[in-house]
Protein backbone atom coordinates (compact mmCIF):
# COMPACT_ATOMS: atom_id res chain seq x y z
CA UNK A 1 0.00 0.00 0.00
CA UNK A 2 1.18 3.53 -0.68
CA UNK A 3 1.50 6.06 2.11
CA UNK A 4 -1.99 7.00 3.32
CA UNK A 5 -1.09 10.63 2.56
CA UNK A 6 -0.28 9.75 -1.07
CA UNK A 7 -3.60 8.02 -1.51
CA UNK A 8 -5.40 10.90 0.18
CA UNK A 9 -3.72 13.52 -2.00
CA UNK A 10 -4.37 11.54 -5.18
CA UNK A 11 -8.04 11.26 -4.25
CA UNK A 12 -8.29 14.97 -3.43
CA UNK A 13 -6.87 15.83 -6.85
CA UNK A 14 -9.08 13.36 -8.73
CA UNK A 15 -12.17 14.92 -7.13
CA UNK A 16 -11.34 18.17 -8.93
CA UNK A 17 -12.57 18.23 -12.52
CA UNK A 18 -9.61 19.76 -14.35
CA UNK A 19 -10.63 18.74 -17.86
CA UNK A 20 -8.59 20.86 -20.27
CA UNK A 21 -11.61 22.81 -21.53
CA UNK A 22 -11.94 24.41 -18.08
CA UNK A 23 -9.45 26.00 -15.70
CA UNK A 24 -6.79 23.98 -13.90
CA UNK A 25 -6.48 26.62 -11.18
CA UNK A 26 -8.32 24.63 -8.48
CA UNK A 27 -5.65 21.90 -8.73
CA UNK A 28 -2.77 24.36 -8.92
CA UNK A 29 -4.09 26.51 -6.08
CA UNK A 30 -4.58 23.49 -3.83
CA UNK A 31 -1.01 22.27 -4.35
CA UNK A 32 0.41 25.78 -4.06
CA UNK A 33 -1.43 26.29 -0.76
CA UNK A 34 0.14 23.11 0.61
CA UNK A 35 3.60 24.22 -0.50
CA UNK A 36 3.06 27.59 1.18
CA UNK A 37 1.89 25.87 4.37
CA UNK A 38 5.16 23.94 4.38
CA UNK A 39 7.17 27.16 4.15
CA UNK A 40 8.03 27.03 0.46
CA UNK A 41 7.58 29.77 -2.13
CA UNK A 42 5.48 28.33 -4.97
CA UNK A 43 5.59 30.28 -8.22
CA UNK A 44 2.38 30.51 -10.24
CA UNK A 45 3.01 31.23 -13.91
CA UNK A 46 -0.32 32.13 -15.56
CA UNK A 47 -1.18 31.65 -19.20
CA UNK A 48 -1.71 34.79 -21.33
CA UNK A 49 -5.35 35.29 -20.33
CA UNK A 50 -4.85 34.29 -16.69
CA UNK A 51 -7.41 31.50 -16.72
CA UNK A 52 -4.84 28.74 -16.20
CA UNK A 53 -1.38 28.48 -14.72
CA UNK A 54 1.77 26.45 -14.46
CA UNK A 55 3.25 25.88 -11.01
CA UNK A 56 6.91 25.74 -10.03
CA UNK A 57 7.95 24.65 -6.54
CA UNK A 58 11.62 24.60 -5.55
CA UNK A 59 12.94 22.84 -2.49
CA UNK A 60 16.36 24.48 -2.21
CA UNK A 61 19.59 22.80 -1.24
CA UNK A 62 20.71 23.06 2.39
CA UNK A 63 22.99 26.00 1.49
CA UNK A 64 20.09 27.86 -0.11
CA UNK A 65 21.01 27.06 -3.71
CA UNK A 66 17.94 27.14 -5.94
CA UNK A 67 19.49 26.48 -9.36
CA UNK A 68 20.59 23.15 -10.79
CA UNK A 69 19.33 19.89 -9.39
CA UNK A 70 16.51 17.72 -10.71
CA UNK A 71 13.00 18.51 -11.92
CA UNK A 72 10.06 16.16 -11.34
CA UNK A 73 7.32 17.15 -13.76
CA UNK A 74 3.68 16.37 -14.41
CA UNK A 75 0.52 17.97 -15.78
CA UNK A 76 -2.58 19.01 -13.89
CA UNK A 77 -5.23 18.66 -16.60
CA UNK A 78 -7.11 15.59 -17.73
CA UNK A 79 -9.21 14.49 -20.71
CA UNK A 80 -13.03 14.58 -20.83
CA UNK A 81 -15.29 11.72 -19.79
CA UNK A 82 -18.04 12.61 -22.27
CA UNK A 83 -19.71 9.55 -23.78
CA UNK A 84 -17.68 7.08 -21.72
CA UNK A 85 -19.40 4.28 -19.79
CA UNK A 86 -17.86 4.38 -16.30
CA UNK A 87 -18.62 1.81 -13.62
CA UNK A 88 -18.38 4.55 -10.98
CA UNK A 89 -18.39 8.34 -10.96
CA UNK A 90 -15.12 9.35 -12.67
CA UNK A 91 -14.60 12.25 -10.26
CA UNK A 92 -15.37 10.22 -7.14
CA UNK A 93 -12.20 8.16 -6.61
CA UNK A 94 -12.61 4.57 -5.51
CA UNK A 95 -10.14 1.90 -4.41
CA UNK A 96 -11.11 -1.55 -5.69
CA UNK A 97 -9.03 -4.69 -6.04
CA UNK A 98 -5.76 -2.93 -5.35
CA UNK A 99 -6.40 -0.15 -7.84
CA UNK A 100 -7.32 3.52 -7.54
CA UNK A 101 -10.05 4.39 -10.04
CA UNK A 102 -10.93 7.85 -11.30
CA UNK A 103 -10.29 10.26 -14.13
CA UNK A 104 -6.63 11.23 -14.03
CA UNK A 105 -5.66 8.50 -11.57
CA UNK A 106 -2.99 7.24 -13.98
CA UNK A 107 -2.63 10.34 -16.13
CA UNK A 108 -1.43 11.78 -13.84
CA UNK A 109 -2.90 12.79 -10.49
CA UNK A 110 -1.67 9.65 -8.76
CA UNK A 111 1.87 10.78 -9.51
CA UNK A 112 1.15 14.37 -8.44
CA UNK A 113 -0.27 13.03 -5.17
CA UNK A 114 3.04 11.27 -4.49
CA UNK A 115 5.04 14.44 -5.20
CA UNK A 116 2.93 16.58 -2.86
CA UNK A 117 3.02 13.92 -0.15
CA UNK A 118 6.82 13.77 -0.19
CA UNK A 119 7.41 17.53 -0.09
CA UNK A 120 7.98 17.39 3.70
CA UNK A 121 10.60 14.66 3.18
CA UNK A 122 12.38 16.85 0.64
CA UNK A 123 12.32 19.80 3.05
CA UNK A 124 13.58 17.73 5.99
CA UNK A 125 16.53 16.34 4.02
CA UNK A 126 19.76 18.30 3.82
CA UNK A 127 19.81 18.40 0.05
CA UNK A 128 23.06 18.98 -1.80
CA UNK A 129 21.07 20.05 -4.87
CA UNK A 130 17.56 21.44 -5.19
CA UNK A 131 14.53 19.43 -6.24
CA UNK A 132 11.96 21.23 -8.37
CA UNK A 133 8.35 20.30 -9.03
CA UNK A 134 7.01 21.54 -12.39
CA UNK A 135 3.25 21.16 -12.86
CA UNK A 136 1.77 22.33 -16.13
CA UNK A 137 -1.61 23.19 -17.61
CA UNK A 138 -3.09 21.97 -20.93
CA UNK A 139 -0.82 19.04 -21.65
CA UNK A 140 -3.69 17.04 -23.09
CA UNK A 141 -4.61 19.43 -25.95
CA UNK A 142 -1.02 19.38 -27.20
CA UNK A 143 1.50 20.21 -24.48
CA UNK A 144 0.51 23.88 -24.52
CA UNK A 145 1.56 24.48 -20.92
CA UNK A 146 4.79 22.57 -21.48
CA UNK A 147 5.84 25.05 -24.12
CA UNK A 148 5.43 27.81 -21.54
CA UNK A 149 6.81 25.97 -18.53
CA UNK A 150 10.25 25.48 -20.06
CA UNK A 151 10.34 29.28 -20.53
CA UNK A 152 9.13 29.76 -16.95
CA UNK A 153 12.01 27.57 -15.75
CA UNK A 154 14.56 29.47 -17.84
CA UNK A 155 13.29 32.89 -16.74
CA UNK A 156 13.77 31.91 -13.11
CA UNK A 157 17.28 30.63 -13.73
CA UNK A 158 16.55 27.17 -12.33
CA UNK A 159 18.82 25.38 -14.85
CA UNK A 160 18.16 21.77 -13.75
CA UNK A 161 20.62 19.12 -14.90
CA UNK A 162 17.94 16.47 -15.34
CA UNK A 163 14.17 16.20 -15.74
CA UNK A 164 11.92 13.23 -15.02
CA UNK A 165 8.44 13.48 -16.53
CA UNK A 166 6.12 11.18 -14.61
CA UNK A 167 3.76 10.16 -17.41
CA UNK A 168 2.45 6.61 -16.92
CA UNK A 169 5.13 4.18 -18.08
CA UNK A 170 4.76 1.42 -15.45
CA UNK A 171 7.94 2.95 -14.01
CA UNK A 172 9.94 2.01 -17.11
CA UNK A 173 12.56 4.58 -18.10
CA UNK A 174 11.54 5.82 -21.56
CA UNK A 175 14.19 7.67 -23.58
CA UNK A 176 12.36 8.24 -26.86
CA UNK A 177 9.01 9.28 -28.27
CA UNK A 178 7.77 10.68 -31.56
CA UNK A 179 7.12 14.34 -32.22
CA UNK A 180 3.53 15.55 -32.54
CA UNK A 181 2.27 18.17 -34.99
CA UNK A 182 -1.41 19.10 -35.28
CA UNK A 183 -2.35 21.43 -38.10
CA UNK A 184 -5.39 22.97 -39.76
CA UNK A 185 -5.88 23.92 -43.40
CA UNK A 186 -8.36 26.68 -44.24
CA UNK A 187 -9.47 26.90 -47.87
CA UNK A 188 -11.46 29.88 -49.18
CA UNK A 189 -12.70 29.36 -52.72
CA UNK A 190 -15.42 31.14 -54.69
CA UNK A 191 -19.04 30.02 -54.60
CA UNK A 192 -21.05 29.50 -57.78
CA UNK A 193 -24.05 27.54 -58.97
CA UNK A 194 -23.02 23.95 -59.54
CA UNK A 195 -24.01 24.25 -63.20
CA UNK A 196 -21.43 27.04 -63.59
CA UNK A 197 -18.33 25.38 -62.22
CA UNK A 198 -16.14 27.48 -64.50
CA UNK A 199 -17.15 30.54 -62.46
CA UNK A 200 -16.31 29.04 -59.09
CA UNK A 201 -13.26 27.82 -57.18
CA UNK A 202 -14.15 24.58 -55.41
CA UNK A 203 -12.73 24.74 -51.89
CA UNK A 204 -13.40 21.05 -51.22
CA UNK A 205 -11.57 19.94 -54.35
CA UNK A 206 -8.49 22.00 -53.48
CA UNK A 207 -8.62 20.66 -49.93
CA UNK A 208 -8.82 17.14 -51.38
CA UNK A 209 -5.72 17.74 -53.49
CA UNK A 210 -3.77 18.80 -50.43
CA UNK A 211 -5.13 15.84 -48.47
CA UNK A 212 -3.90 13.60 -51.28
CA UNK A 213 -0.45 15.18 -50.94
CA UNK A 214 -0.45 14.41 -47.20
CA UNK A 215 -1.34 10.82 -48.00
CA UNK A 216 1.57 10.62 -50.45
CA UNK A 217 3.92 11.71 -47.66
CA UNK A 218 2.48 9.05 -45.37
CA UNK A 219 2.78 6.29 -48.00
CA UNK A 220 6.40 7.30 -48.63
CA UNK A 221 7.20 7.11 -44.91
CA UNK A 222 5.51 3.73 -44.60
CA UNK A 223 7.16 2.15 -47.65
CA UNK A 224 10.52 3.95 -47.93
CA UNK A 225 11.24 5.07 -44.38
CA UNK A 226 13.28 6.17 -42.63
CA UNK A 227 12.57 3.49 -40.06
CA UNK A 228 13.31 3.15 -36.36
CA UNK A 229 12.73 -0.35 -35.00
CA UNK A 230 12.60 0.98 -31.46
CA UNK A 231 9.00 2.07 -32.07
CA UNK A 232 5.90 -0.12 -32.28
CA UNK A 233 5.06 1.77 -35.50
CA UNK A 234 8.59 2.11 -36.80
CA UNK A 235 7.97 4.92 -39.30
CA UNK A 236 6.50 8.41 -39.16
CA UNK A 237 2.74 8.71 -39.66
CA UNK A 238 0.36 11.35 -41.00
CA UNK A 239 -3.41 11.55 -41.37
CA UNK A 240 -6.35 13.84 -42.09
CA UNK A 241 -8.80 13.31 -39.27
CA UNK A 242 -11.48 16.02 -39.40
CA UNK A 243 -13.06 17.90 -42.32
CA UNK A 244 -15.89 20.41 -42.88
CA UNK A 245 -16.96 21.99 -46.16
CA UNK A 246 -19.78 23.13 -48.41
CA UNK A 247 -23.33 24.26 -47.72
CA UNK A 248 -25.56 22.43 -50.22
CA UNK A 249 -25.10 19.92 -53.03
CA UNK A 250 -25.90 22.30 -55.90
CA UNK A 251 -23.42 25.02 -54.91
CA UNK A 252 -19.71 25.09 -55.64
CA UNK A 253 -18.34 25.23 -52.08
CA UNK A 254 -16.67 28.41 -51.00
CA UNK A 255 -15.19 27.12 -47.73
CA UNK A 256 -13.52 23.98 -46.48
CA UNK A 257 -11.35 23.30 -43.44
CA UNK A 258 -9.62 20.13 -42.39
CA UNK A 259 -7.37 19.11 -39.53
CA UNK A 260 -4.42 16.77 -39.79
CA UNK A 261 -1.65 15.46 -37.60
CA UNK A 262 1.70 13.80 -38.09
CA UNK A 263 4.07 12.07 -35.71
CA UNK A 264 7.69 11.74 -36.68
CA UNK A 265 10.59 9.58 -35.56
CA UNK A 266 13.80 11.48 -34.74
CA UNK A 267 15.18 10.97 -38.27
CA UNK A 268 12.35 13.09 -39.74
CA UNK A 269 12.32 16.84 -39.04
CA UNK A 270 8.80 17.91 -38.08
CA UNK A 271 9.50 21.55 -38.98
CA UNK A 272 10.84 20.63 -42.43
CA UNK A 273 7.76 18.46 -42.96
CA UNK A 274 5.50 21.40 -42.16
CA UNK A 275 7.49 23.49 -44.65
CA UNK A 276 6.79 20.86 -47.35
CA UNK A 277 3.07 21.04 -46.63
CA UNK A 278 3.07 24.84 -46.73
CA UNK A 279 4.98 24.81 -50.04
CA UNK A 280 2.36 22.53 -51.61
CA UNK A 281 -0.42 24.72 -50.19
CA UNK A 282 1.22 27.79 -51.77
CA UNK A 283 1.35 25.98 -55.14
CA UNK A 284 -2.36 25.19 -54.95
CA UNK A 285 -3.21 28.69 -53.75
CA UNK A 286 -1.50 30.16 -56.82
CA UNK A 287 -3.82 28.09 -59.03
CA UNK A 288 -6.84 29.31 -57.10
CA UNK A 289 -5.82 32.95 -57.21
CA UNK A 290 -5.33 32.78 -60.99
CA UNK A 291 -9.12 32.47 -61.09
CA UNK A 292 -9.94 34.79 -58.17
CA UNK A 293 -7.28 36.75 -56.22
CA UNK A 294 -9.55 36.76 -53.15
CA UNK A 295 -9.19 33.00 -52.67
CA UNK A 296 -6.60 31.45 -50.35
CA UNK A 297 -5.29 28.25 -48.79
CA UNK A 298 -3.74 28.73 -45.35
CA UNK A 299 -1.90 26.27 -43.14
CA UNK A 300 -1.63 26.75 -39.38
CA UNK A 301 0.36 24.57 -37.01
CA UNK A 302 -1.75 24.56 -33.85
CA UNK A 303 0.50 22.18 -31.95
CA UNK A 304 4.13 21.24 -32.50
CA UNK A 305 5.65 19.12 -29.75
CA UNK A 306 9.23 17.98 -30.33
CA UNK A 307 10.12 14.34 -30.05
CA UNK A 308 12.36 12.87 -27.39
CA UNK A 309 15.62 11.15 -28.24
CA UNK A 310 17.71 10.99 -25.08
CA UNK A 311 21.01 9.14 -25.40
CA UNK A 312 20.71 5.83 -23.48
CA UNK A 313 24.12 6.62 -21.95
CA UNK A 314 23.05 10.06 -20.69
CA UNK A 315 23.42 10.90 -17.00
CA UNK A 316 19.66 11.35 -16.60
CA UNK A 317 19.09 7.77 -17.74
CA UNK A 318 21.66 6.41 -15.29
CA UNK A 319 20.08 8.52 -12.54
CA UNK A 320 16.59 7.17 -13.26
CA UNK A 321 17.93 3.61 -13.18
CA UNK A 322 19.66 4.18 -9.83
CA UNK A 323 16.42 5.54 -8.39
CA UNK A 324 14.53 2.38 -9.26
CA UNK A 325 13.22 3.14 -12.75
CA UNK A 326 13.02 -0.06 -14.79
CA UNK A 327 15.60 -0.13 -17.60
CA UNK A 328 13.92 -0.33 -21.00
CA UNK A 329 14.74 0.04 -24.67
CA UNK A 330 11.11 0.95 -25.44
CA UNK A 331 10.26 4.09 -27.36
CA UNK A 332 6.66 5.26 -27.43
CA UNK A 333 4.39 6.63 -30.13
CA UNK A 334 2.55 9.14 -27.90
CA UNK A 335 3.99 12.57 -27.16
CA UNK A 336 4.90 14.08 -23.80
CA UNK A 337 6.41 17.26 -22.42
CA UNK A 338 9.75 15.45 -22.14
CA UNK A 339 10.59 16.51 -25.68
CA UNK A 340 10.05 20.15 -24.75
CA UNK A 341 12.28 19.85 -21.68
CA UNK A 342 14.98 18.14 -23.73
CA UNK A 343 14.83 20.70 -26.54
CA UNK A 344 15.18 23.47 -23.91
CA UNK A 345 18.45 21.96 -22.67
CA UNK A 346 17.17 19.83 -19.80
CA UNK A 347 18.04 16.16 -20.43
CA UNK A 348 14.82 14.24 -19.86
CA UNK A 349 13.28 10.81 -19.49
CA UNK A 350 9.72 9.62 -18.98
CA UNK A 351 9.18 7.47 -15.89
CA UNK A 352 5.95 7.33 -13.91
CA UNK A 353 3.34 5.08 -12.31
CA UNK A 354 0.47 3.47 -14.17
CA UNK A 355 -0.20 2.22 -17.68
CA UNK A 356 -0.79 4.54 -20.64
CA UNK A 357 -3.14 1.86 -22.04
CA UNK A 358 -5.80 2.75 -19.45
CA UNK A 359 -5.31 6.53 -19.63
CA UNK A 360 -8.15 8.44 -21.33
CA UNK A 361 -10.47 5.41 -21.12
CA UNK A 362 -13.51 4.72 -18.98
CA UNK A 363 -12.61 3.24 -15.59
CA UNK A 364 -9.10 4.68 -15.70
CA UNK A 365 -7.03 3.36 -12.80
CA UNK A 366 -3.55 3.21 -11.31
CA UNK A 367 -2.45 0.11 -9.38
CA UNK A 368 -1.62 0.97 -5.77
CA UNK A 369 1.65 -0.92 -6.10
CA UNK A 370 2.62 1.55 -8.85
CA UNK A 371 2.12 4.45 -6.45
CA UNK A 372 4.39 2.61 -4.00
CA UNK A 373 7.02 2.33 -6.74
CA UNK A 374 6.71 6.06 -7.45
CA UNK A 375 7.14 6.84 -3.75
CA UNK A 376 10.27 4.70 -3.61
CA UNK A 377 11.64 6.44 -6.72
CA UNK A 378 11.21 9.92 -5.21
CA UNK A 379 12.52 8.82 -1.81
CA UNK A 380 15.59 7.41 -3.55
CA UNK A 381 16.11 10.76 -5.27
CA UNK A 382 15.92 12.53 -1.91
CA UNK A 383 18.47 10.10 -0.47
CA UNK A 384 20.81 10.49 -3.45
CA UNK A 385 20.74 14.29 -3.18
CA UNK A 386 21.11 14.35 0.63
Image (spheres, rainbow, N blue to C red):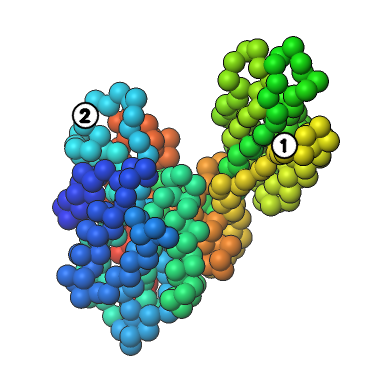
Whole-percent x, y for residue 219 in the image:
74, 30
Q: Which mark is residue 88?
A: 2
Q: Which residue is depicted at the point 41% across and 50% down?
A: 138
Q: Which residue is depicted at the point 60% across and 39% down?
A: 184
Q: Which mark is residue 295?
A: 1
User: CA–CA distance between discs 2 and 1?
Assistant: 51 Å
Q: Is residue 295 above or below residue 69?
A: above
Q: Is residue 56 left or right of residue 344?
A: left
Dot 2 or dot 1: first in sequence order is 2
Q: Which mark is residue 141?
A: none
Whole-percent x, y for residue 357 in the image:
43, 35
Give the farthest residue toward the bottom: 63
Tell me if residue 325 can be seen.
no
Q: Which residue is depicted at the point 52% across and 42% down?
A: 334
Q: Which residue is depicted at the point 73% across and 32% down?
A: 210
Q: Is residue 251 left or right of residue 339?
A: right
Residue 252, located in which quarter of the rendered image? top right
Element under disc 2: loop
Tell me if residue 28 can be seen.
yes
Amino acid sequence: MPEPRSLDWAQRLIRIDSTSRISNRPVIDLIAAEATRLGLDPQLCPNPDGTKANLLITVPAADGTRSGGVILSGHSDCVPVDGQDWTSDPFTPEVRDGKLYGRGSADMKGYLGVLVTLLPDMIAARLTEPIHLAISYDEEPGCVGGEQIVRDIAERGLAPRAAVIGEPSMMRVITGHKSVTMGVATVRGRAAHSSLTNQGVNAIEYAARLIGFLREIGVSWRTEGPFDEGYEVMYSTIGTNLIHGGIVVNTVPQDCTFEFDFRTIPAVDMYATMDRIRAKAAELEAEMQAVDPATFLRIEARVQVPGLGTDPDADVVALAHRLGGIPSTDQVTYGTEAGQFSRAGMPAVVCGPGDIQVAHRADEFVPLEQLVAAEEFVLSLIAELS
